[in-house]
Image (spheres, helix red, strand yellow):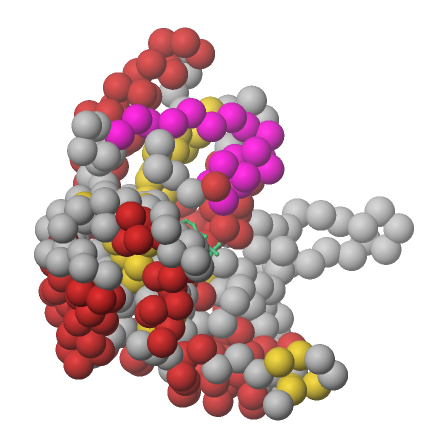
Amino acid sequence: MKIAGNIPIREVEENFINIQPIQAAGRLTAEAMKALIVYGDGYSTCDQCRKPFRLDKITKPPIAEFHNDLARFLSMDEARVTPGARRAFQAVCLALVNKGDTVLVSALGHYTEFLAVENAKATVREVPTNDVNIVTGDAVAQKIEEVTREQGKSPALVMLDHFDYSLANEHDVVGAAKAAHQYDTPILYNGAYTVGIKPIDGKALGVDFVVGSGHKSMASPAPSGVLATTSEYADTVFSTTQMIGDVTGRQFGVKEVQMLGCTLMGGNILAMMASFPTVKRRVQEWDEYVAKSNYVVDALLGITGNTCVSEYPRKHTLTKVDTTGSFDTVARTHKRRGFFFSDELKQRGIVGAFAGATRAWKLNTYGLNWGQTRYVADAFKEVAGKYGLL
Ligand SMILES: *Cc1c(COP(=O)(O)O)cnc(C)c1O
């Protein structure tokens, strides 16, 4: 069956348990799917757009209310939707960072943070992790001092991932925020792997910006994301246009420069809104999802030779494990090489483990119910048993 021409149907979520690292918490709710279909026309959001003509002011459908809800959800003062977390990093960098400035990111920081800094013609400096792969407040303070000594001024911004993309270790955001503020440096909280799955209180964390990814963690279509900030920084990052056309004298009033006017239109924002009641509910169940994550990781650790590369016990559903001492020993002689492992999982209805990978690889158990959790754990044990690894 094709959607049109040679575009195939995708039926991953319908037919399999998917433990793919970046897909797990982005998969859509049924409500988001409905919104995508009905509001798929890009400017459908503009049916009832009235003065002052800005996306976040539209009341029918209740987009303005959604923006207020988002800010409250993150305990921040103002929020905007953005085309992904990366565009939120970009907006903050373009607003706060000047050419030649330095921005601190973590040594486990995401590549999109690097690009956002580069886009603002500034330079990244990395805060090293400690011996257990955690970024501490002290390390942030030390790096700020180092940069300040070198350059005669403190970094323009600190960006820190609460849980990094690589190990999903939890980094010391509160300590980092204290350190940054001691040097009058604003701090951006990268919640790509938290906002939408774990309760986040931006004020309690002491951060100036909270960024989330809709398609990573808010059951929303790509691209979608959120940028929330305090009243202190709202006017800077959401500054309005000052341009005047020299021929026509035209001005565009309340359009926000860093947002390029309106951001998410049509099905994107409506699907995000349609998933939001589920998202608000599910963040309260985070501890349960972490327990399920530990259940699966424990099953993997029960297989001789396996190690957990991420911090353990797990505080997140995304985990990097190393199976060099187990599944990889099978891959060395198996005719399918490393693919034997993903083959075995697929035969058991599980996809999302990187095909061919049997050394260090990542899995994300977010969204599994207990039945599925036990099933995945048993499947790993079963595959191990089949090859005499237990
Ligand atoms: C996925 C990810 C991003 C990028 O998010 P987008 O919404 O796709 O732009 C940024 N940072 C981290 C830590 C991520 O895991």
Decide which of 1, 221 is in the foreground and name it.
Answer: 1
Q: How many marks?
A: 0
Residue 320: tell me if it is visible: no
Work out which quarter of the rendered image holds the N terminus and state it.
bottom right
Residue 139: tell me if it is visible: yes
Q: Which residue is drawn at 57% across and 33% down?
A: 118
Q: Which residue is drawn at 26% across and 19% down?
A: 142
Residue 40, picture quadrant: bottom right
Q: Position of residue 125 (x, y in %)?
A: 42, 25
Q: Is residue 83 left or right of residue 249?
A: left
Q: Where is residue 352 in the image (x, y as percent from the top left)?
A: 39, 65
Residue 129, picture quadrant: top left
Q: Residue at x 62, y 60 (%)?
A: 261
Which residue range is magenta in the image?
Answer: 112-129
Q: Position of residue 114 (x, y in %)?
A: 49, 36
Work out which quarter of the rendered image holds the C terminus and state it.
bottom left
Q: In this view, does 124 lie to the left or right of 299?
A: right
Q: Does the magenta stretch include residue 378?
A: no
Image height of 10 relative to 195, above or below: below
